[in-house]
Image: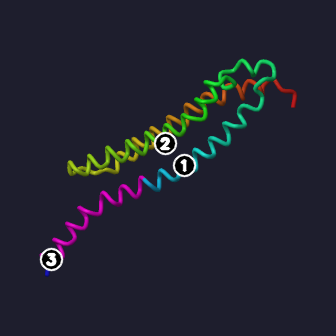
Amino acid sequence: MQNFASGAAGSCAAEGWPLLYLGTVAVLGGLGLLVNLLALYASIFATDDCGTGAASASFRCTTAGRLTMYALPWAGLVVAVVAATGLGVAAVNRGDSPWWFLLAGAGAHLAGLAGACAVMLPGVRRARSGSDI
């Protein structure tokens, strides 16, 4: 009975880790999707003052700026999920722990969000400092 229990626990743990890891990546990817929808909402309103004076000279008011602002969070999320999945599965195949690669995915997603914020915020700060409200 002892051999059966130890053998069953070892095989279950070996088969359960990749599935548990991939499920975690999927849940975190879903949360990243919600964060990206909030970033999209914010980026739409970041272009409200385009076409009014000095704000229209800002990068976020150009077509390239808008595309950058809209695409960077989504590209970061795709890179995050692919990197976390690929590196994690490779780590499991080597016999290592895959959980550290969730941090690599989070870093990739945060880099995409930071890039979008870098495009959005400089013009917003400049526009607010010049207003009389």
Which residue is depicted at the point 14% across and 81% down? 1
Task: Answer left or right for 35 relative to 82.
Answer: right
Q: Distance between the residues labelled 1 and 2?
A: 8 Å
Main SS of the magenta part reads helix
Which residue is depicted at the point 18% across and 76% down? 5
Counting from the top left corner in percent of width and height, residue 103 is at: 40, 44
Q: What stretch is highlighted in magenta?
A: 3-25
In the rendered image, residue 35 lying in the magenta stretch gets the answer no
Classify mark 2: helix, strand or loop.
Answer: helix
> Are the residues at dot 1 and dot 2 in contact (C-beta closer than 8 Å)?
yes
Counting from the top left corner in percent of width and height, residue 31 is at: 53, 52
Q: Residue lying furthest front in this view?
A: 63
> Are the residues at dot 1 and dot 3 in contact (C-beta closer than 8 Å)?
no
Q: Which mark is residue 77?
A: 2
Q: Residues within 10 Å of mark 1 (few under 14, many from 20)?
A: some
Which residue in the protein does label 3 denote? 4
Is residue 33 shown above or below 118?
below
Q: How far apart are marks 2 and 3 (CA)?
A: 43 Å
Amino acid identity at mark 1: Leu
In the rendered image, residue 15 lying in the magenta stretch gets the answer yes
Is residue 48 shown above or below 101?
above
First-in-chain label (1 vs 3): 3
Amino acid identity at mark 3: Phe
Instruction: Nearest to the eye among marks 1 and 3: give it.
Output: 1
Counting from the top left corner in percent of width and height, residue 113 is at: 55, 37
Which residue in the protein does label 1 denote? 33
Instruction: Nearest to the eye among marks 2 and 3: give it.
Output: 2
